[in-house]
C-alpha cells in the first residue's frame, strides 16, 4: 500500500477527534463504546486545544490524499505519564488501514522528530491484550510499570 507520512496541518487537528476514538482499544467489536466517550476529561487531555502546548507534535498518514492515521504526542497527565519532561504518545489508524506497516512507520518517524528536538525519552500506555503492544516492543519501547489492565512503556533515545 502506498502512503505518505507528513506533518499534520493545524486545520486538520479536528481529525484528532476521530483518531482519539479509533485509538481506544475495544475488545468487543459487537459492543463498541459510543463516540461520546472521547468527551471524558481523562481522554480530552490528549486532544483539547492541540497545538497550543510546546510539546504538541502530530504526524499523519495519507493514502490517496485522505488522512487515514495519526500519531501525536504531548506532555500531559495522561495514562502513560512518566514525568514532567516526557511526551506521551497516542497513535491511531482507521480499521481498514491497519496491518500494513503504517502505524509502525508513524511511530518511528515521530521518534525521529522527538530525538531531533532533544527529548531523552517518550512514553505510552497500552492495554495488555492490545495487538499494538507487540509493535511497541519491536520499535523499542520497554515496560517500566503496569497495573491490572495496562503496561506503562518508555522509549529512551
Image: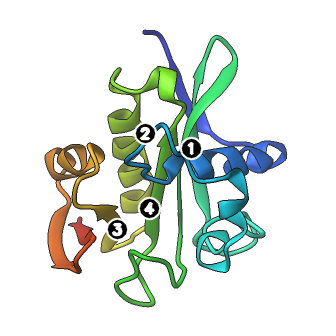
Q: Secondary structure at mark 4?
A: strand
Q: Quadrant of residue 61?
A: top right
User: In the rendered structure, which disc, 4 or 2, sits on the residue that comes first in sequence?
Assistant: 4
Q: Is residue 48 above or below residue 35?
A: below
Residue at 29% over, 45% down:
132
**Label 4 to label 3: alpha-carbon separation:** 8 Å
Which of the two discs, 1 and 4, sits closer to the camera? 4
Q: Is residue 65 above or below residue 16?
A: above
Labels 1 & 2 near each other (Cβ < 8 A): yes
User: In the rendered structure, which disc, 4 or 3, sits on the residue that comes first in sequence?
Assistant: 4
Q: Identify the mark at residue 125; answer none if there is no mark.
A: 3
- Closer-to-camera residue (134/121): 134
Residue at 16% over, 52% down:
137
Residue bearing mark 1? 59
Mark 2 surroundings within 10 Å by alpha-carbon count, few (fewer than 14), some (14 through 19), many (20 or more)? many
Q: Quadrant of residue 141?
A: bottom left
Labels 4 & 3 near each other (Cβ < 8 A): no
Which of the two discs, 2 and 3, sits closer to the camera? 3
Q: Locate residue 144 relative to residue 23 in the image: left or right.
A: left
Mark 1 surroundings within 10 Å by alpha-carbon count, few (fewer than 14), some (14 through 19), many (20 or more)? many
User: In the rendered structure, which disc, 2 or 3, sits on the residue that comes first in sequence?
Assistant: 2
Residue bearing mark 2? 106
Which of the two discs, 4 and 3, sits closer to the camera? 3
**Label 2 to label 3: alpha-carbon separation:** 17 Å
Residue bearing mark 4? 89
Amino acid at each position: 500500500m502506498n502512503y505518505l507520512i507528513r506533518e499534520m496541518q493545524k486545520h486538520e487537528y479536528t481529525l484528532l477527534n476521530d483518531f482519539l476514538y479509533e485509538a481506544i482499544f475495544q475488545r468487543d467489536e459487537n459492543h463498541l463504546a459510543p463516540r461520546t466517550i472521547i468527551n471524558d476529561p481523562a481522554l480530552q487531555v490528549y486532544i483539547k486545544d492541540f497545538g497550543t502546548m510546546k510539546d504538541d507534535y502530530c504526524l499523519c498518514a495519507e493514502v490517496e490524499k485522505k488522512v487515514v492515521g495519526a500519531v501525536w504526542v504531548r506532555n500531559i497527565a495522561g495514562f502513560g505519564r512518566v514525568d514532567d519532561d516526557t511526551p506521551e504518545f497516542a497513535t491511531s489508524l482507521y480499521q481498514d488501514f491497519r496491518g500494513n506497516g503504517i502505524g509502525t512507520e508513524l511511530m518511528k518517524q515521530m521518534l525521529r522528530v522527538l530525538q531531533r528536538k532533544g527529548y531523552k525519552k517518550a512514553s505510552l500506555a497500552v492495554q495488555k491484550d492490545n495487538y499494538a503492544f507487540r509493535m511497541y516492543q519491536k520499535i523499542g519501547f520497554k515496560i517500566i510499570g503496569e497495573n491490572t489492565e495496562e503496561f506503562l512503556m518508555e522509549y529512551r533515545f
